[in-house]
Amino acid sequence: METERLILREMELQDAETLYHYWSDPLVTKYMNIAPFTSAKQAEDMIQLISDLSLKGQANRYSIVLKESNDVIGTCGFNMIDEENSRAEIGYDLGSPHWGKGFAAEAVKKLISHGFTDMGLNRIEAKVEPENKGSIKLLERLSFQKEGLLREYEKSKGVFIDVYMFSLLKREFLK
């Protein structure tokens, strides 16, 4: 999949070193459900896990690649796919040097379009920690609706956390 400045392609093991660099950054992983990585092997294992889940139709993840340099700058995809109910949960991360340049919005917008048009989804969800102001702003800019607070809904880094549930419906996207 392509946008004006980006290519979204399946994650590959060759992306592990770059993704390790991002996923070992406490700024990047602050709101992710992983602790900062301490080895490139962890990134390789994550890529393999996502590949296995993708083969089962349960999740998918794409490397976000800058067209002009061919550099991997982050990832995005669907963390959970529920085919029976035509819904999926979206997730995304960018290396901190690439924040504030519109790359996340560009990638996520393309991913949403893919979800609704190619995957046949009716609903795309996003769960976001209340302190993650950047992600909340991005979702609101992309017309996601905040549905409410899910109290102590997930365990992240060994602690139960609250998350906001956001959603976007296909009929809202196609307006």
Image (spheres, rainbow, N blue to C red):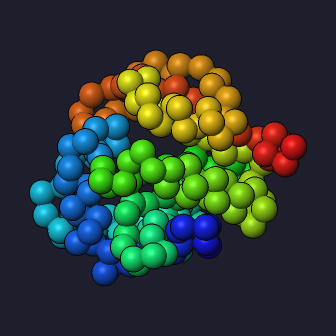
Q: Is residue 150 visible?
A: yes
Q: Residue furthest left?
A: 38
Q: Is residue 167 visible?
A: no
- Quarter the N terminus occupies: bottom right
Please report the residue visible at 63 percent of the width from the left and 25 percent of the height from the top. Answer: 146
49 relative to 21 in the view: left or right:
right
Q: Where, by quadrant of the figure, is residue 52 drawn?
A: bottom left
- Residue 97 in the image: state x and y as whole percent: 30, 53
Q: In this picture, is 72 found above or below 102?
A: below
Image mark count: 0
Please report the residue visible at 40 percent of the width from the left and 30 percent of the height from the top. Answer: 132
- Residue 120 in the image: state x and y as whole percent: 78, 60
Please report the residue visible at 27 percent of the width from the left and 28 percent of the height from the top. Answer: 159
Query: Is 96 in front, or is 9?
Result: 96
Query: Is 143 in front, or is 114?
Result: 143
- Residue 47 in the image: state x and y as whole percent: 35, 69
Q: In this picture, is 91 found above or below 48?
A: above
Q: Where, by quadrant of the figure, is residue 58 drawn?
A: bottom right
- Quarter the C terminus occupies: top right
